[in-house]
Image (tube, rainbow, N blue to C red):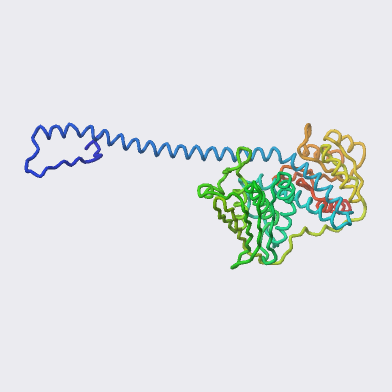
């Protein structure tokens, strides 16, 4: 069977008798072969068309995913500045309260707020770097039991308070104390655990039990989170870690488990899930053991050079008051300006040792403020404060760059360095 000068098939017709086909029958068969060839060619073309359509749909889906990721990146960059401003207020005021609070219960509550604000800061940075994250971040020795206790404290309003208001009882059972230390970032591991706890609450509309266990097995630290919820069927289970896959409706992004899996894989570990409809779900997280016993703690502040600084803070009203109060708490004199033009008028009228200015401001950017400050008062030091992540580079007019939200300890270290530079 020939189509377009190509052999596309063969028609084999036979009879038991010798010379059984007459000339007319042979002519009929020969007249049919072009039609058979056309049918075979059409079938082949149809198959190729279906394959091409499937490849096109796959390519379109990939383009849509890339576009959605790009859109998420743009949204993350757009809200990062405002979100970090809010976290700056929460973190700085909480840390100022912690400096004077003596009551153990109140300190514990304030420490939970402080840890939540830090996690919020780290979450913003992870979302900003979702598509271009670096693997160079150093890990430390992490106590999994402490991570579990902190995550439960941060989510208690959800599995206890909210559940009780909705008329469903959720209990939490823990079995801790047997896990060796693992290597990783405690804030990121805590984020994964918080996400799993929230998912468990959503999976138990009638209430139930969340059980969390830590253990050490064969060179790994294990974290197991199980619930008695609705469970997942095989099809849902197969897509559980898929990007943008969600069973919670249009109000959810479907990024939770995907990001969680990315975090665990970046730690050199793995996250596995088992589930059956009506019988709940269990997640098992395996993380490599820590090679050292180094605690996760901030470095001690640098030694402070005697003498207070005159500090001008330039930012919007929300952050300005909190940052000024933090500077005063550290024993320095401070003035505030709600914009670049007002700041330059103050610098021209009176001397300042240090200007801390926001980067993104209407009318005049932080870089422009820094350049004009150096022109008006060359000995005045300038620190740029930004909520746009860690990608901002210093300029010759700036001594340092800080990323929002700024912790009180970090601000204290900045002041110490500024005092040392002034003394020098």
Q: Can you tell which quarter of the image residue 375 is in?
A: top right
- Residue at 61%, 64% (x, y): give it: 220
Left or right: residue 145 compared with residue 34: right
x and y percentages locating residue 192 in the rendered image: 65, 52
Q: Nearer the viewer, residue 243 or 69?
A: 243
Q: Nearer the viewer, residue 242 or 60?
A: 242
x and y percentages locating residue 306 in the rendered image: 92, 55
Q: Quarter of the image for the N terminus: give it.
A: top left
Left or right: residue 257 compared with residue 110: left
Position of 304 relative to 125 (above/below)? below
> Count of labels shown?
0
Position of 85 relative to 187 (above/below)? above
Q: Quarter of the image for the C terminus: give it.
A: bottom right
Q: Nearer the viewer, residue 261 or 213?
A: 213
- Residue at 60%, 56% (x, y): give it: 283
Q: Nearer the viewer, residue 232 or 153?
A: 232
Position of 8 relative to 174 (above/below)? above
x and y percentages locating residue 338 in the rendered image: 84, 35
x and y percentages locating residue 263 in the rendered image: 62, 53
Task: Identify the residue at the far left of this view.
Answer: 18
Left or right: residue 86 compared with residue 126: right
Q: Can you tell which quarter of the image residue 396 is in?
A: top right
Left or right: residue 244 compared with residue 28: right
């Amino acid at each position: 069977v020939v189509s377009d000068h190509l052999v596309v098939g063969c028609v084999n017709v036979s009879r038991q008798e010798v010379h059984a086909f007459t000339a007319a029958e042979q002519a009929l068969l020969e007249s049919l072969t072009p039609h058979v060839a056309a049918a075979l060619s059409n079938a082949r073309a149809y198959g190729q068309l279906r394959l091409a359509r499937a490849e096109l749909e796959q390519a379109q889906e990939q383009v849509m995913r890339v576009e959605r990721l790009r859109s998420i990146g743009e949204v993350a960059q757009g809200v990062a500045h405002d979100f970090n401003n809010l976290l700056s207020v929460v973190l700085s005021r909480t840390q100022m309260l912690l400096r004077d609070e003596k009551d153990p219960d109140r300190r514990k509550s304030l420490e939970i707020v402080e840890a939540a604000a830090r996690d919020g800061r780290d979450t913003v940075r992870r979302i900003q770097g979702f598509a271009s994250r670096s693997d160079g971040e150093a890990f430390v020795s992490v106590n999994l039991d402490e991570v579990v206790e902190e995550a439960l404290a941060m989510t208690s309003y959800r599995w206890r308070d909210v559940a009780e208001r909705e008329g469903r009882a959720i209990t939490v059972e823990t079995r801790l104390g047997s896990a060796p230390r693992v290597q990783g970032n405690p804030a990121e591991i805590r984020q994964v655990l918080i996400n799993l706890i929230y998912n468990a609450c959503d999976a138990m509309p009638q209430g139930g039990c969340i059980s969390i266990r830590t253990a050490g097995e064969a060179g790994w630290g294990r974290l197991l989170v199980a619930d008695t919820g609705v469970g997942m069927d095989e099809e849902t289970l197969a897509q559980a870690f898929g990007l943008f896959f969600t069973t919670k409706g249009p109000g959810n992004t479907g990024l939770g488990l995907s990001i969680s899996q990315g975090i665990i894989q970046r730690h050199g570990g793995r996250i596995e899930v088992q589930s059956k409809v009506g019988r709940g779900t269990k997640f098992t997280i395996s993380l490599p053991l820590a090679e050292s016993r180094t605690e996760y703690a901030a470095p001690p502040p640098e030694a402070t050079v005697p003498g207070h600084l005159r500090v001008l803070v330039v930012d919007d009203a929300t952050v300005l008051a909190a940052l000024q109060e933090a500077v005063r708490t550290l024993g320095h004199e401070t003035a505030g300006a709600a914009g670049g033009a007002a700041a330059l008028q103050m610098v021209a009228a009176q001397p300042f040792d240090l200007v801390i200015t926001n980067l993104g401001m209407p009318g005049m950017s932080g870089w422009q403020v820094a350049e004009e400050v150096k022109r008006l008062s060359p000995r005045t030091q300038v620190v740029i404060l930004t909520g746009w992540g860690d990608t901002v580079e210093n300029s010759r007019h700036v001594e340092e760059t800080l990323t929002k939200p700024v912790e009180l300890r970090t601000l204290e270290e900045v002041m110490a360095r500024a005092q040392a530079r002034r003394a020098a």
